[in-house]
Image (spheres, rainbow, N blue to C red):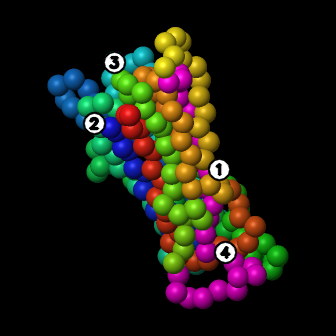
Amino acid sequence: MKIATLLAGVAAVALTASAASADTINHGQTTLPIVGTQNVSGGNFLENIAAGLNRANAQNGDSAISSWHAFGGAQGDNGTAAGDDGATFTLKGMVSTDCAYYSGSSTSQTIDFGTIGIYASDNTGPAAAFDMTAPANVTIDSNLAGCNTSNTVTLSKSDIRGLVNNSSAGYDTNVFQANLPFSVTANYTAGDVGVAGSASATSLVLPTGSNSVSKQHGAWKSAMALNVNIPVPSKSLLAGSYEGDLTVNIAAF
């Protein structure tokens, strides 16, 4: 059995004075013969080329080299904010002998959204103040996923509310909310249980209002893309840390 756990720790709305730029997530890992597992991150010109090659390899299910790569980001503040802020998204996983999901080493499975922007109160007016400016999303690609026998693929959340802010400050529930619902779509290629034949493209969707979703398959092996989306909520955001766990589980039966 293979279980890869994606720990989404999003420190969402603590206010800062600088705006986060788009596409701030651009890193991953690859495991090469002899040299072993290497970290790959965008940055300067050559680093961006290496990151682009690793991202392309992470989407190639026929590659002889194992890679994972995360590429995405969140829109920064519209206005001037103040205080401390941050965001973390931690991905952890392990690979067993029966089922597989390549997720690299646990030391490099942190995906930082940076600032999840809000409309700062000094230049946006009262209606939009503290509202989230745009959806936050990230795509996590792995070129190795599957199982060599019948199995169940499951996406689940630690809390049906999504990412939860456990702030002790207190708040007006009419205008603020202490949770950020999120959805996940897993895209991969797999067939049905008991059927020998060509596999087909599969999308397994975990909606914002659901806690878990699963699908059974026969033996399969392909790349897998996990598309995580945090939509703009209907109410304003509290300062502090919004956290929750997302788990992808590929289990033989």
Q: CA distance from mark 2 to mark 1?
A: 28 Å
What residue is disc 2 on?
A: 96
What's the CA distance linking mark 4 and mark 1? Answer: 19 Å
Residue at 34 percent across and 18 percent down: it is 64
Which tag, 4 or 1, sits closer to the chain's start?
Answer: 4
Disc number for residue 207 = 1
Element carrying mark 4: strand
As shown in the figure, which amino acid type bears the numbered disc 4? Gln
Q: CA distance from mark 2 to mark 3?
A: 19 Å
Residue type indicated by callout 1: Pro
Residue nearer the viewer, 182 or 112: 182
Residue 63 makes an appearance in the image: yes
Inter-mark Cα distance, 1 to 3 = 34 Å
- Residue lying farthest left? 34
Q: Check disc 3 and give the amino acid type.
A: Ala
- Residue 10 lies in the magenta-colored region: no
Q: Residue at x 51, y 33 (%)?
A: 216
Taking the spot 61% from the left edge, 69% from the top edge, the residue there is 179
For label 1, count other residues whose C-alpha is less than 10 Å away and answer few (under 14), some (14-19) or many (20+).
some
State the residue position of label 3.
Answer: 64
Q: Horizontal placement of 236 versus 161: left or right?
A: right
